[in-house]
Image (cartoon, coloured by chain):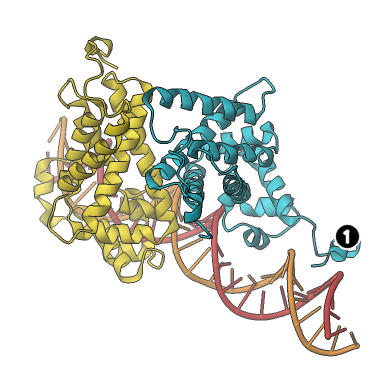
Chain colours: A cyan, B yellow, C orange, D red
Amino acid sequence: MSVAAIANMGRMARWKPNARGRLEQAALELFRERGYARTTVEEIAARAGLTERTFFRYFPDKREVLFWGSGALQKTIVDAIAGAPEPAAPLDAVAAGLEATASVLQRGREYARTRQALIADNAELRERELIKLRSLATAIADALRRRGIPEPAASLAAEAGIAILKVAYERWIGDNKPRSLSHHLRESLDELKALTASTSTAIGRSHPARVTRRRRQARA
Amino acid sequence: MSVAAIANMGRMARWKPNARGRLEQAALELFRERGYARTTVEEIAARAGLTERTFFRYFPDKREVLFWGSGALQKTIVDAIAGAPEPAAPLDAVAAGLEATASVLQRGREYARTRQALIADNAELRERELIKLRSLATAIADALRRRGIPEPAASLAAEAGIAILKVAYERWIGDNKPRSLSHHLRESLDELKALTASTSTAIGRSHPARVTRRRRQARA
DNA sequence: GAAGTGATGTCATAATCTGACATCGTCAGT
DNA sequence: ACTGACGATGTCAGATTATGACATCACTTC
């Protein structure tokens, strides 16, 4: 559809603007009111002024309405890792990626809070969240490998990144002071670094022996 | 039901012996024939000589028919960790736990193979497997903490244990030689130890500075 | 202005899962 | 043996999620 068509929204009786967003919004409201399990897709669609069938055109299943953002999030992280300054330790590249999430996640702490509460008390949603985190972990590891980071280190750094993200996110949500997610990310990262510094693993190392590693990637 | 009643199975028209086992068996057969998604619970129940409703009395949902064993497995591991010889490094206690699984998992490699193949090509099943592994990880970490192992180490050792189990299981399944799961477990463990030995983390350490740690647990 | 396209709606249906209640052997106690 | 409790199943009805096939409507393009 052209830009003109979008601007033209007035006359369109059938075409509802931002259907996906309206569905998300309606779903979240209803989930807050009655909980995830007790609201049906039909109700969500109705509140959004749409049909059950249309809901399933925008979301492959009911759970995804709470995870739609994760796709964009993952892309953001991966891109940021790819674009990090060249000679960076694995964990620093990951950190750059995580920093980039802060902007995407800024739908507000309030949203994050209720979303996490919903996920916490529903098994289906917890399952889905785990899958998304696994997907993110492998995506991060891939991105690191594309930077020439060899295998044990790439996976380990990716796992560490997920761990940091989880801790920071949790703290950010439970934090009453107006400290940003970025703040908690940096803090968690520093803690992890302190923890590994004393025992010195490959993930934390500053410059991997300064090998000219750039040549080995090309395109991938 | 008394032992006599069980021995008496002959006369019982309604009561089918080992209903759960028959359902599992029927399910596995059908999954092999048509795949997981294309077989219905009704078909499974029919082949087991039971009703759809009864299937759901034995398994909370269709997926669980492939994961029923995981409960026993987890218990086995946790018990073995609890019963490991007292002054053991975290990873050694975990290793003792994993060793104990070998007996439970011995439903044969053939079963394991088809089961993993089924899980691999179905999203719902992959999700469920992840959940089970998370559950196992936290159970292991708990067991280690009950042995007096402090927090970063307990979780890390648990994660390492899961990683070892996954690798060993995978290799065992893909192995044509008749090497046991135990063999692959030991091998994977050794590889991990070698990997961490050079960098020396807390997980691999032999004796945690020989502190008298036994007094601090009592009952937990 | 005719064909085409994209977003929705409508209808029909499969499949998963649950609650309520009936039935049928078996066991325990009398 | 009679009876009542009990445990495993069956039967029935229904909510809910999810998908396929096809119609419609507004708007675009040639």
The N terminus of chain A - image quarter: bottom right
User: Where does residue B28 sit, x and y in percent of width and height?
Assistant: 28, 62
Please state which of residues C27 and B161 is positioned toward the viewer in this rendering. Answer: B161
Q: Which residue is mark 1?
A: A7
- In this rendering, would B101 be left or right of A131? left
- Circle 1: residue type: Ala
Please state which of residues D16 and B67 is positioned toward the viewer in this rendering. Answer: B67
User: Which element is circle 1 on?
Assistant: helix
User: Where does residue D21 sit, x and y in percent of width and height?
Assistant: 60, 79
- In this rendering, would A175 be left or right of B91? right
Q: Is residue A82 above or below residue B43?
A: above
Please state which of residues B81 and B20 is positioned toward the viewer in this rendering. Answer: B81
Q: Is residue D15 above or below residue B82?
A: below
Q: Please tell me which residue is depicted at 39% across the width and 47% down the height of the picture.
A: A151
Question: Pointer 1: residues within 10 angstroms few (<14), some, or many (20+)?
Answer: few
- In this rendering, would D21 be left or right of A16? left
Q: Is residue B112 above or below residue A170?
A: below
User: Where does residue D3 sit, x and y in percent of width and height?
Assistant: 23, 40
Q: Please tell me which residue is depicted at 29% across the width and 67% down the height of the picture.
A: B32
User: Where does residue B96 sit, x and y in percent of width and height?
Assistant: 18, 34
